[in-house]
Amino acid sequence: MTDQYAVIGNPIAHSKSPLIHRMFAEQTGQDISYKAILAPLDGFAATIERLRAEGYKGCNVTVPFKFEALKLATRIDPHAEIAQAVNTLKFDNGEIMGYNTDGRGLVADIQFNLKIDLKNKNILLAGAGGAASGVIHSLATMGARVTIANRNVEKAQILVNRFSHLFAPNNNAEKKSPTRNNALSYADLAGQQFDIVINATSASLTDSTIPLPATIFAPGALAYDMMYGRDTPFMKFARTHGAAVVADGLGMLVEQAAEAFYLWRGVRPDTAAVLKKLRA
Ligand code: NDP
């Protein structure tokens, strides 16, 4: 019997996950179906219950349900625990297993697809929502130095406090306290430069810009927008203000999906082939 999977979000119509998982299944000979399911904003738990009752084997979880998915999971892997967000659920013998594959997806895209080493890089992570929370641990454990900027600085500070054991001080900043140095407002960024600037805000969803200083990109810098599917204002800004490499989040999407596929099926798909087809 075909095993059923889905991605659940609100909105969800734009999702490329069904296409990606169908390509993985075809490539690896796995007999699965994968749908996009719109859950009502107040109906995530009920949707999961329905899927489990119908015999689904698991699902991906996207905006805005990653925190609710964490609460619903009966067992949580260390990546989800540290991110306090779940993007992959596996239904297994009455358990709801919760995982977070976003961080591994981003690292794989930067290191393997873009071929940029993260070790000792100064990274600016713009945004302090679910996506930012999901990637900090993976970036920091690759030896990168992470600074978070957010409109609401308190939210950035909460993340820095949660991950304080991982933060090396922002060596751009004059202030001495590691926690204070690593949680900044956009205005605090004046005069600072970063090797990698990651847009983990949802500003690109509404074609909005984030207020970065024009001199934010260090020589050779990578500008990475987690948004995919269009050329965003952040990507245009990066191209005209000195970023050497500009990337969207399609590679991260494919890589985090591959991690989820592996957790469900125990088989690793060839992500490079899928990414090439999607870009074409
Ligand atoms: P959340 O809603 O959890 O967080 C949104 C963040 O964006 C907050 O930090 C918020 O700041 C900030 N923000 C929103 N609008 C603006 C704006 N106009 N200017 C500055 N900051 C703004 O969303 P997620 O973290 O879950 O998702 C963020 C993005 O990452 C989305 O575009 C999503 O599609 C993408 N994503 C991509 C993935 C991929 O595989 N490529 C995986 C996961 C996410 P504040 O706190 O001040 O309100």
Image: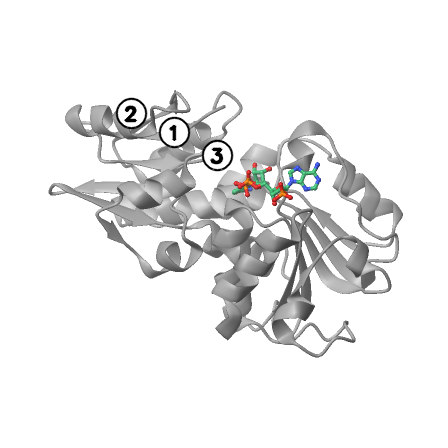
User: Which x, y percent locates residue 111?
Assistant: 58, 61
> Which residue is under mark 3?
63
Residue 108 visible in this rendered orientation of the protein: no
Q: Look at label 3 and name its amino acid.
A: Val
Q: Considering only order in the chain, which callout, 3 or 1, is on the residue closer to the N terminus? A: 1
Q: Is residue 87 above or below residue 183?
A: above
Instruction: Please identify the quadrant where the C terminus is shown.
Output: top right
Q: Residues within 10 Å of mark 3 (few under 14, many from 20)?
A: some
User: Which x, y percent locates residue 42?
Assistant: 37, 24
Q: CA distance from mark 3 to mark 2?
A: 15 Å
> Which residue is under mark 1?
8
Q: Are marks 2 and 1 in contact (CB under 8 Å)?
A: yes
Q: Secondary structure at mark 2?
A: helix
- Residue located at (61% from left, 54% from top): 154
Q: Considering only order in the chain, which callout, 2 or 3, is on the residue closer to the N terminus? A: 2
- Residue located at (88% from left, 46% from top): 240
Q: Considering only order in the chain, which callout, 1 or 2, is on the residue closer to the N terminus? A: 1
Q: CA distance from mark 1 to mark 3?
A: 8 Å
- Residue located at (37% from left, 37% from top): 60
Q: Is residue 19 above or below residue 81?
A: above
